[in-house]
Amino acid sequence: MTVPGIGLLIATALIATVSGMAAFRDGRHLAAWRGLTPRESSSGQRRCLGGISKRGDRYLRMLFIHGARSALLAAMTQDHTGKKPLTRLQRWAVDLAARVGHNRAGDTGGTDHQERHPDR
């Protein structure tokens, strides 16, 4: 199984940084650890989500953001040319970029937008 935007450089940096993937229950916990989830400042019934928390390894976060932006650019190019149909993940990424903008969709990999709007 391959993940768009994750290549040899990101995979080896991730393995070198994380001692074992068993420490994370799922991908969302890994995203929180690497600092790509929204900062939360909630109290009682009020839920307030800010920008990405920017915690964790700065270099690894930068690699993941560049990989996400690259995968998003490839999906948008493929959508505009129309030569091949988009996968569900690519269609979701292109639609997300249309709603929230290219930079925000690429920076968070959608985790920020999903946390703010879980019904979309």
Image (spheres, grey):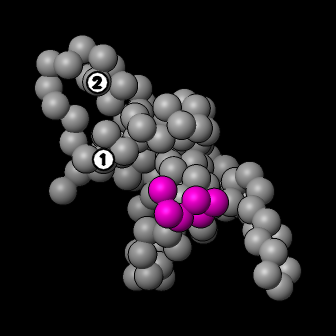
- Left or right: residue 53 versus residue 16 is right
Whole-percent x and y of residue 1?
A: 18, 56
Whole-percent x and y of residue 99?
A: 54, 37
| Real-space CA distance between mark 1 and mark 2, rounded to the nearest whole angstrom | 12 Å
Asked if labels 2 and 1 touch by Cβ distance under 8 angstroms, the answer is no
Image vertical order of residue 30 relative to residue 103, above or below? below
Whole-percent x and y of residue 75?
A: 32, 30
Magenta residue check for 97:
no
- Residue 107 in view here: yes
Whole-percent x and y of residue 22?
A: 40, 82
What's the amino acid at mark 1? Leu
Callout 2 secondary element: helix
Image vertical order of residue 63 relative to residue 80, above or below? below
For image coordinates 81% across by 75% down, the residue present is: 46
Image vertical order of residue 58 relative to residue 37, above or below? above
Q: Nearer the viewer, residue 86 or 107?
A: 86
Q: Nearer the viewer, residue 39 or 49?
A: 49
For image coordinates 47% across by 79% down, the residue present is: 24
Magenta residue check for 116:
yes
What's the amino acid at mark 2? Asp
Callout 1 secondary element: helix
Determine the residue located farthest toward the left in the rendered image.
84
- Residue 7 in view here: no
For image coordinates 82% across by 70% down, the residue present is: 41
Q: Which residue is mark 1?
A: 89
Chain part drawn in magenta: 115-120
- Tell me where residue 77 sits by quadrant: top left
Q: Which residue is mark 2?
A: 79
- Tell me where residue 62 sits by quadrant: top right
